[in-house]
């Protein structure tokens, strides 16, 4: 049904207008990401608004969250500035709603005569409805190359509105192909009726376009497109498996697939076929985050199926670790299994683990009666029948500063005397990032499913930098507990997106727990990739000091210094021109500041570029381990006591590592390339 409508629509769209090189007038507000209608002429009820994050189906914006909507009762129009039809002569845009085709439409006009040369009206969706889902359209105006034109968005209806976003003018052949793929993806058609295979095909056809020199060297990213949370971090068939939230088709969040990579050692990753695609009625919005477990020899992926109906827990099973079959009885946990006052709209991110003969899942959930969230526990002995096993902990108004609104991606790990919950709270107030990442200690009472001895004042951040979210752990067969997280965050333009991929995983960290504190250090396997060991000692320096021998942007660094009063520290990704990351110690705290490497990606204020954490000295010294990988810096202080992660876009010339101090200070710095 959907396919039939989709195909008709596609043919109509691609043959819509076949009608005319030079430069186009490029203004920056084609996607309304300035948050206003600057440069557009508007009359009547057109407004820029923000879309909700998981609005139904394939409703996603192309870039950022701003788009334009008109009012249902009101009428009016929106007119672009005039520009010259250029490159391939095709123009692409997103349209949603517009259920009154005669009077809600987008038209294209010659600037001088105002003659209408093309018009697009929205199509019905699979159910014969017009809805808020954004569909992409392409108009072929190659016949009008070099002609001055403008675009008009029209709402002459008093019972319908039109939504538009992401106009693309002057598209190159590559951009045209991308838009064509986006048409298919939004229609749920893709390149193959099997959405999983379609994703693989797309990746194979496009991964090679990404410049290998513009990729991280030892941090996992998607092969193409967007990734967010780590999923299914686990060990199966002698290999480390890491899955991830993945939209292979674009460098924005979209229809969530599970990408998959395997590794013998956490450093060298091999991509596997896409594991899950959003191809069932219960996961049309996406196969959201989840985890994996080996159980009776088979490999189980447990994930959240997100659809317009809500969020439910699902499973997919594999014998070989590569091909996953979605379980016929999905969902395995749905609205019937919810405790009182729990919303099916926010019920996600199951982390699976075993304890005392039971298989457990901890899941993030949200109340119906207020805006706070809670973590729920379920258990089973056969994987298919799950029983509710208790409310692990709950947020409330007094905890929003640390626990935000929705606690996403929970994990539960146990040490000798304590159980520790890792969780990523959304919308944390007064936080440098929109969202946080915290750990909460206590003792699990497995009979009641509750975390006892939980003291809100003992909540700590896992990572004190800017780019760390949705952490997930796995137990290595050798007993180590390893954690990985999404090395990015929501609500900002992702770095590297112009290279064709967005998002990376942190380098995996080994976790230990002492005196109520989580220690994290890069997994030791990285040592095997160290080459060209070199070091330098700076004696009594008071000024910024460099040495030609300590340069590099894909390196593993160890540095120690005994701080005196004032600031003392190091600079990384330094071009000696002021672009750099500065890491310094002052009065018990370690600071990280980014200069000139986040423009256009993060707000440029201090809040978004300056972070700090309290650290102890080790025998009177600041002891640092620092990993640089082209676009990332991960700092581990005081033998893993504190970690700070940040990303940015330093250029290839930002290679220097320097040291500075207010008072004469000695520095020992050694480093190796990672290859
Ligand atoms: C966290 C998250 C999860 C959700 C996933 C969707 O970053 O919002 O809660 O499952 O991303 O991609």
Image: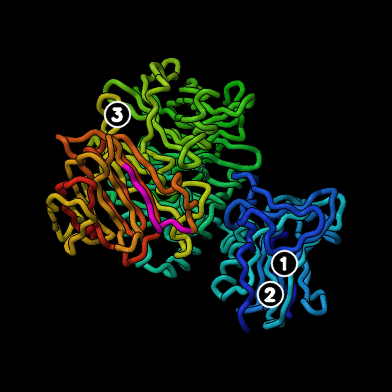
Q: With 433 as the anchor, is 509 left or right in this view?
A: left
Q: On residue 83, which mark appears?
A: 2
Q: On residue 46, which mark appears?
A: none
Q: Which residues are magenta?
A: 591-599
Q: Is residue 408 above or below residue 255?
A: above
Q: On residue 80, which mark appears?
A: 1
Identify the image's colour scheme: rainbow, by chain, secondary structure or one colour.
rainbow
Residue under the point 26% across and 24% down: 515
Q: Position of residue 85 (x, y in %)?
A: 67, 78
Which of pointers 3 and 1 indicates the residue nearer the eye? 1
Disc 3 target residue:
517
Q: Secondary structure at mark 2?
A: strand
Q: With 168 as the anchor, is 258 left or right in this view?
A: left
Examine the structure image and report whether residue 597 is included in the region drawn in magenta.
yes
Disc 2/disc 3 C-alpha distance (Å): 59 Å
Q: Is residue 291 above or below residue 13?
A: above
Q: Is residue 38 visible?
A: yes
Q: Position of residue 330 (x, y in %)?
A: 55, 38
Near-viewer residue (331 or 348): 348
Q: Is residue 481 visible?
A: no
Quadrant in which residue 112 is drawn: bottom right
Q: Is residue 478 above or below residue 214?
A: above
Residue under the point 82% across and 79% down: 113
- Sequence-wise, the earlier of marks 3 and 1 is 1
Callout count? 3
Q: Does the numbered disc 3 mark a residue whose Cβ is under 8 Å from ligand 1?
A: no
Disc 1/disc 2 C-alpha distance (Å): 9 Å
Near-viewer residue (108 or 30): 30
Quarter of the rendering occupied by the C terminus = bottom left
């Amino acid at each position: 049904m959907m396919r039939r409508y989709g195909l008709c629509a596609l043919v109509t769209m691609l043959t819509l207008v076949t009608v005319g090189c030079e430069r186009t007038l490029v203004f920056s507000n084609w996607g309304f990401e300035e948050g206003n209608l600057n440069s557009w002429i508007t009359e009547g009820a057109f407004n820029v608004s923000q879309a909700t994050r998981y609005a139904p189906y394939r409703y996603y914006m192309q870039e950022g969250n701003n788009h334009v909507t008109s009012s249902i009762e009101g009428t009016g129009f929106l007119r672009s500035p005039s520009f010259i039809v250029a490159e391939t002569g095709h123009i692409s845009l997103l349209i949603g709603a517009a259920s009154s085709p005669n009077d809600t439409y987008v038209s294209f006009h010659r600037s001088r005569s105002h003659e209408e040369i093309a018009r697009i009206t929205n199509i019905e969706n699979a159910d014969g409805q017009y809805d808020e889902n954004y569909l992409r359209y392409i108009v072929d105006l190659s016949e009008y190359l070099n002609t001055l034109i403008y675009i008009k968005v029209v709402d002459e209806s008093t019972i319908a509105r039109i939504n538009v976003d992401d106009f693309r003018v002057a598209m190159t052949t590559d951009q045209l192909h991308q838009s064509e793929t986006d048409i298919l993806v939004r229609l749920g058609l893709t390149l193959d009726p099997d959405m999983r295979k379609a994703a693989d095909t797309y990746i194979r056809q496009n991964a090679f376009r990404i410049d290998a020199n513009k990729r991280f060297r030892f941090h996992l990213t998607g092969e193409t497109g967007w990734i967010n949370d780590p999923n299914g971090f686990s060990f199966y068939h002698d290999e480390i498996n890491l899955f991830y939230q993945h939209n292979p088709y674009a460098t924005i969040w979209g229809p969530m697939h599970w990408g998959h990579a395997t590794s013998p050692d956490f450093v060298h990753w091999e991509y596997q076929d896409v594991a899950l695609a959003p191809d069932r009625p219960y996961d049309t919005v996406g196969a959201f985050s989840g985890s994996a477990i080996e159980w009776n020899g088979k490999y189980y992926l447990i994930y959240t199926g997100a659809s317009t109906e809500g969020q439910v827990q699902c499973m997919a099973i594999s014998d070989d670790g590569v091909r996953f079959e979605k379980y016929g009885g999905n969902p395995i946990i749905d609205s019937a299994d919810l405790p009182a006052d729990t919303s099916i709209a926010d019920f996600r991110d199951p982390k699976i683990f075993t304890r005392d003969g039971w298989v457990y899942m901890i899941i993030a959930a949200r109340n119906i009666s207020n805006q706070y969230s809670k973590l729920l526990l379920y258990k089973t002995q056969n994987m298919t029948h799950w029983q509710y096993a208790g409310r692990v902990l709950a947020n409330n108004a007094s905890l929003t500063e640390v626990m935000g609104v929705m606690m996403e991606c929970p994990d539960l790990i146990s040490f000798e005397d304590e159980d520790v919950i890792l969780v990523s709270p959304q919308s944390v107030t007064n936080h440098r990032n929109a969202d946080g990442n915290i750990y909460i200690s206590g003792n699990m009472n497995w009979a009641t499913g509750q975390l006892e001895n939980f003291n809100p004042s003992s909540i700590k951040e896992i990572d004190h930098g800017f780019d760390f979210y949705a952490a997930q752990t796995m137990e290595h067969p050798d007993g180590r507990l390893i954690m990985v997280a999404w090395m990015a965050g929501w609500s900002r333009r992702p770095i590297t997106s112009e290279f064709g991929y967005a998002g990376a995983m942190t380098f995996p960290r080994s976790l230990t727990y002492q005196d109520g504190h989580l220690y994290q250090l890069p997994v030791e396997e990285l040592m095997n990739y160290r080459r060209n060991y070199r070091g330098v000692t700076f004696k009594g320096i008071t000024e910024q000091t460099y040495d030609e021998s300590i340069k590099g942007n894909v390196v593993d660094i160890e540095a120690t210094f005994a701080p005196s009063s004032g600031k003392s520290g190091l600079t990384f990704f330094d071009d000696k021109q002021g672009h750099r990351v500065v890491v310094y110690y002052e009065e018990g705290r370690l600071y990280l500041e980014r200069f000139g490497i986040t423009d256009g990606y993060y707000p440029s204020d201090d809040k978004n570029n300056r972070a700090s954490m309290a650290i102890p000295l080790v025998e009177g010294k600041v002891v640092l381990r620092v990993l640089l990988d082209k676009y990332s810096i991960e700092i581990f202080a005081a033998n893993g006591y504190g970690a700070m992660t940040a990303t940015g876009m330093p250029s290839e010339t930002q290679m220097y590592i320097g040291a500075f101090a207010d008072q004469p200070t000695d520095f020992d710095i050694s480093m190796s390339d990672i290859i």
